Amino acid sequence: MLGTFRDYGLDTDGDSKYNFLVIEVDVNITDTGNYTITGWLTDKNDQDICYTEVKDNLNEGHHNLSLRMKGEFIYQHGIDGPYKLGYVTLRNDDHDLLDNYRNAFSTKNYTYADFQTPAQLDISISPTSYNFGNIAVGSTKIQAFTITNTGSVDLVIGNLSITGMNASEFSIQNDNCSGQTIAPSRTCTVDVKFSPTSTGAKSATLNIPSNDPDKNPLSVSLTNAEASSTNGKSGGGGSCFIDTVWSFVKKESQR
Ligand SMILES: [Ca+2]
Ligand SMILES: [Ca+2]
């Protein structure tokens, strides 16, 4: 049977923000076995925040188990406490419902900002695109790019690559980024070399895969002077985006 409850905030990484709201549950067991306690956390208006469970093999007698509610969920919910254990259940190995309570417990008066800010995965690069300008056939130009971890957790970078129409005329050099783990606010650098083998508009894309879910891969446009002047002429003062799409459509239709 479920007994009394207590709560406290638990900071596991020393940044003074609670990684967990822990609700301790006293439980009285009459038969030794495996048990699961599941708790649903709600705000004071009965809106769900998250749920968690704790499983353990318990001997007959009194025990104290901890439900660890993830702090990030509480922060994201954005409502100050007190929070409530809106529903809690005790089940055995056969999933039989042995005990349950609604609105079992109300926590202390936390504010949501007491809890952990969600981890942010953010990659950025400078420059965000590059035009190598007018490079004669047979000569080369090298441009450096700096990748920065602008998030709050480690950025894991995969293998950089160059793809696109003229990929073979661009190459990656001095790659200090591929396969590296970049700490927050830290940077890595990579060079891209452009060596045109013929005249005309050239374009390719530098691809940077990483664990940033909304920019994977991060794409950097690589062009030369002819590529940009082609786009400029065909547009007649229209938007660059439409010019680019139109020249792409034309190239596709010529195939
Ligand atoms: Ca913390
Ligand atoms: Ca991101």
Image (spheres, rainbow, N blue to C red):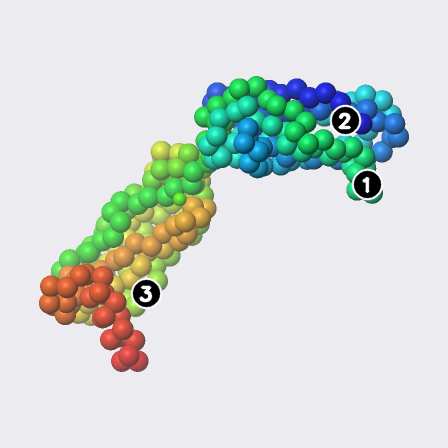
Asked if the residue at label 2 sits under 8 Å from ligand 1, the reply is no
Q: Which residue is mark 2?
A: 2
Q: Quadrant of residue 169?
A: bottom left
Q: How far apart are the alpha carbons under marks 2 and 1?
A: 14 Å
Q: Which mark is residue 164?
A: 3
Q: Position of residue 15 (x, y in %)?
A: 47, 22
Q: Quadrant of the N terminus?
A: top right
Q: Earlier in the sequence, mark 3 or mark 1?
A: 1
Helix, strand or loop at label 2? It is strand
Q: Position of residue 226 (x, y in %)?
A: 15, 65
Q: Which residue is mark 1?
A: 96
Closer to the observer: label 3 or label 1? Answer: 1
Q: Position of residue 143 (x, y in %)?
A: 23, 50
- The answer to whether residue 36 is visible is yes
Which one is nearer the viewer's eye here, 158 or 57? 57
Q: How far apart are the alpha carbons under marks 3 and 1?
A: 59 Å
